[in-house]
Image (cartoon, helix red, strand yellow):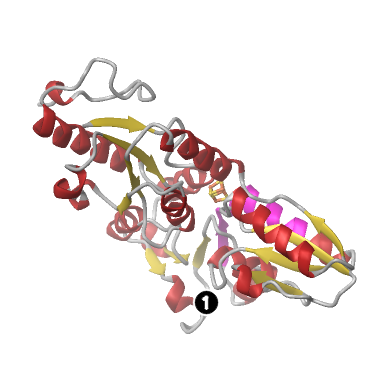
Amino acid sequence: MRVIRAEVLGMCFGVRDALRVVERIGDPGGVIVHGELVHNEVVLGDMERRGFAIRREAERSTAELPRGHRVLITAHGISDRERTRLEAAGNELLDTTCPLVIRVHLAARNLHEEGYHVLVLGRKGHVEVRGVVEDLERVDVIEDEADVRDFGLPRLGIVCQTTTPESRAAELRRRIAACNPDSEIRFVDTVCQPTKDHQRALERLLDRVDAVVVVGGRSSNNTRQLLELCHLRGRPARLVTSADELDEGWLAGFASVGLTAGTSTLDRTIDEVHRALVQIGTRMNGPLPADCCPADPGLVRSDALA
Ligand code: SF4
């Protein structure tokens, strides 16, 4: 079994920057993380072991507002309303919002101020989307075709959740335009570049492999979108959070397997999965051919493993 790694995979600059801020915090016990820093259980487990108090997203709406703490805002960002509430409660905010999420907020706000009814293409209830819509009076979230209708409004302004696949955004835009032929429609492309790069690299990889292993958190939107792209292209694919979850029986059916990973996946997790895949491949077929995994200059060959 050949293992071929996507040319672009794994952690984006937004998550790396957020983790750098977290690593520099000397007194984790004094910090409340307002949500899940990234949707990756390995990262969250590391943080909890260091002493951070993580207010999971499910608890955020019901739990009491923290008061007088240092509160870390995650890479997904929050609304200005939420920011004001946290500051009014005497908290000091440590902000790791990704600049490309801030770009979505600004685009949506500008459209709103110019009189457009804002449509956010993204997942309803996702923390990033909630942060964008909470500051707007006139807004709808479009998650799928069922949400598209004739809005009966003269001006519609469209933005995207940063991790929306480009093809999905294009399809929803086309449907919105078809249902609202008399509306002036403005589109601001706020899909982030790392998401585009990951998706495009996976498109290329899909031409070369029989199946794909996607590494990342189960609640990570961009990881799920990578899995969905594989299924849309008719390739068997499995999402794993770690090497322990690899299913040797499932892998046995394929001559070549691709490897990709979501933008919140640690390098070490990707390397562990890669190493395990190579070992499984070696057990199946003997040592790897010399040209295996051309996209991965750091490939660990199974016959070089200790
Ligand atoms: S996925 Fe995109 S928007 Fe989200 S943290 Fe990474 S770069 Fe920023």
Whether residue 78 can be seen here? no
- In the rendered image, residue 184, in percent from the top left (x then y), is placed at 89, 63
Q: Quadrant of residue 306?
A: top left
Q: Is residue 288 above or below residue 231?
A: above
**What span is colored magenta in the figure?**
92-108
Quadrant showing the N terminus: top left
In the picture provided, is 285 more to the left or to the right than 123? left
Residue positioned most to the top = 290
- In the rendered image, residue 208, in percent from the top left (x then y), is placed at 39, 31
Asked whether 14 or 3 is in front, the reply is 3
- In the rendered image, residue 30, in percent from the top left (x then y), is placed at 41, 63
Q: Residue at x 78, y 62 (%)?
A: 177
Mark 1 element type = loop
- In the rendered image, residue 109, in percent from the top left (x then y), is placed at 78, 63
| Within-10-Å neighbours for mark 1: few <14, some 14–19, many 20+ | some
Q: Is residue 234 covered in magenta? A: no
Q: Is residue 203 above or below residue 40?
A: above
Question: Looking at the picture, which amino acid does disc 1 mark?
Answer: Arg
Whether residue 294 can be seen here? yes
Q: Which residue is mark 1?
A: 67
Asked whether 31 or 33 is in front, the reply is 33
Q: Quadrant of residue 261?
A: top left
Q: Quadrant of residue 89?
A: bottom right
CB of mark 1 near ligand 1 (< 8 Å): no
Q: Is residue 103 covered in magenta? A: yes
